[in-house]
Amino acid sequence: MSTKFQEIAEITCQEEISADIFSMWIKTENIAKNAVPGQFVSLYSSDGSSILPRPISICEVSDDRCSLRLVYRVAGKGTREFSFLKNKDAIKVLGPLGNGYTLKDSSAMLIAGGIGVPPIVELAKQLHKKGVKDIKAVVGYRSELFLKEELEKYCSVYVATEDGSSGVKGNVMDAIREHGLSADTIYACGPKPMLKAVSDFAEQTGTEAQISLEGRMACGIGACLACVCKSKETDEHSNVKNKRICADGPVFDSREVEL
Amino acid sequence: MNTKVNLAGIELENPVMTASGTFGSGMEYSEFVDLNHLGAVVTKGVANVPWEGNPVPRVAEVYGGMLNAIGLQNPGIDLFIKRDLPFLAKYNTKVIVNVCGRTLEDYLEVVERLGDEDTVDMLEINISCPNVKEGGIAFGQNEKSVEHVTKEIKKIAKQPVIMKLSPNVTDITVMAKAAEAGGADVLSLINTITGMKIDIERQSFVLANKTGGMSGPAVKPVAVRMVYQVANAVKIPIIGMGGIASAEDAIEFMLAGATAVSVGTANFVNPNTTEEVVEGIKNYMDRHNIDDINSIIGAVR
């Protein structure tokens, strides 16, 4: 009945795949079984001085649906602690949380920047599995690439880097223009300025865009009202123009939120 | 074994409640916790009209705790009565509605509206939120206004009234006595302690509101001390809260003089905390051969 699970998961693999970007596979009882692309989990520190969970997006679900791959950036004390975890170590996890992407049959363009890239890997996999013919990913990085090979298994990949070391020099929007890319549905995850540009692009081209937001969270399940974003219309739950990123999102239709 | 406690004539199955603002109206947590097992659910503050709350970021982690500046975002009393109360009515637990307002009239309007709602067992009046400019703490830091607000609310309230006190005062017993003099049935304390966090890399405040209310395990010793002081200053019962994350913490508050306890921030750390505290209290009673939980209230003198 319950869709969210609190578990002690076991780490089965941890590696640094780029500077300060870590990939961690964890074995879960129920979380992986129930996860869909675009959802996230809350990871808890074992240090009592760090009380709040760290929301981390789901990068991949193993084929046997027993494990989750989490790719995260070390951004502070909590994520630093996670990066030290080794095989067979345990970690407290709550999930799967939030609403994922709605997978459409139409042609898909997956746009992601930086640490927004991980969730589109599982998304590309599931779209591919669903039989969507035309899938492309446009991914932006500062310099060093990660998860590109994983994406290439399921779709064509276009790269942009800020320093021009790979692909188009600039951001994902530059890459989209340069290659003249378009699709029926856009799925995006990344920093707010990127999402804003993607939303504007979607509006100009009359494309549906599902964008994934992030925010400072406490509970992760919709109770504390910390991680709200502005909505264009009065939200049904909050009764004001606020939506909860953790519970109403993190994936929103770009037309329903103000960035 | 008796775990029942009594707050102003309202009998709670056990002393464990939720702290306002940390549990919504129970809906989100009902996926993890059987609300029937809790002494009471205390809802997030509700005002006469919907409130948008503060800009984000609204939360920040601090050592052993957190800061929040949600700003009492709430859907307003109309939707609350239509949606949240019917949900809570399905459960066999006591329902305490936390009431907030910018003016005394705002509070009175909500109190009046709730008067005819059978689902509501008690009212908790939030005169101690540090994150709103008007109302909230402005009413709770002056003894005359504490007494006045309490008195006016008591005149029209149909349910027993809990006044929620702020720790951000020189002497909390002065405010406690003022609320008692105004006719408060119960006191709850502490609300959060005003704090601040600065991001030294960006050289700016972490919270959009600059300041926020601190909660979590780090504030517990301050809260226990204040509960003890207030318990020795007034005759009305106290609901103790501030950093409770385990049954041991809850027992500590009860020994200091609290009749009931609230679990707040710990819900964010472990959504099952409330139920675990209920079970843990029973284990403690077992271990210490305690037949009646009431025997430990204020037992440390």
Image (cartoon, coloured by chain):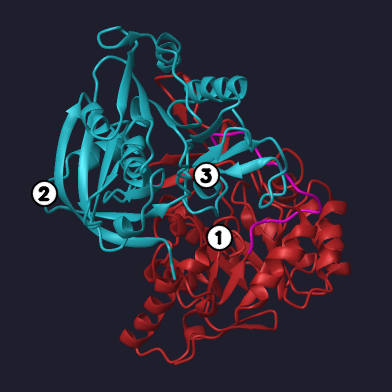
Which chain is drawn using cyan? A
Q: Judge depth for marks 2 and 1 and give the one in front.
A: 2
Please name the residue that numbered disc 1 is placed on: B23
Residue A157 sits in which quadrant?
top left
Looking at the image, can residue B77 be seen? yes
Chain letter for mark 3: A
Q: Look at 84% across and 52% down and name the residue there.
A: B106
Dot 3 crowding, Cα within 10 Å, few <14, some 14–19, many 20+:
many
- Measured in 3D between alpha carbons, the distance from the residue under mark 2 to the one under mark 3, in whole angstroms, is 32 Å
- Is residue B48 within the magenta segment? yes
- Measured in 3D between alpha carbons, the distance from the residue under mark 3 to the one under mark 1, in whole angstroms, is 19 Å
Q: Which residues are magenta?
A: B43-57
Say whether residue B69 is left or right of residue B285.
right
- Measured in 3D between alpha carbons, the distance from the residue under mark 2 to the one under mark 1, in whole angstroms, is 35 Å
Chain letter for mark 1: B
* Residue A40: percent from left, percent from top: 39, 46
Dot 1 crowding, Cα within 10 Å, few <14, some 14–19, many 20+:
many
Please determine if labels 2 and 3 lie on a single subunit. yes
Looking at the image, can residue B70 be seen? no
The secondary structure that dominates the magenta segment is loop
Q: Look at 63% across and 47% down and name the residue there.
A: B169
Quadrant, the N terminus of chain B: bottom left
* Residue A31: percent from left, percent from top: 32, 58
Nearest the eye: B4 or B180 = B4
Please name the residue that numbered disc 2 is placed on: A87
Residue B250 sits in which quadrant?
bottom left
Say whether residue B40 is left or right of residue A106.
right
Give the residue type at disc 3.
Answer: Gly
Please name the residue that numbered disc 3 is placed on: A249
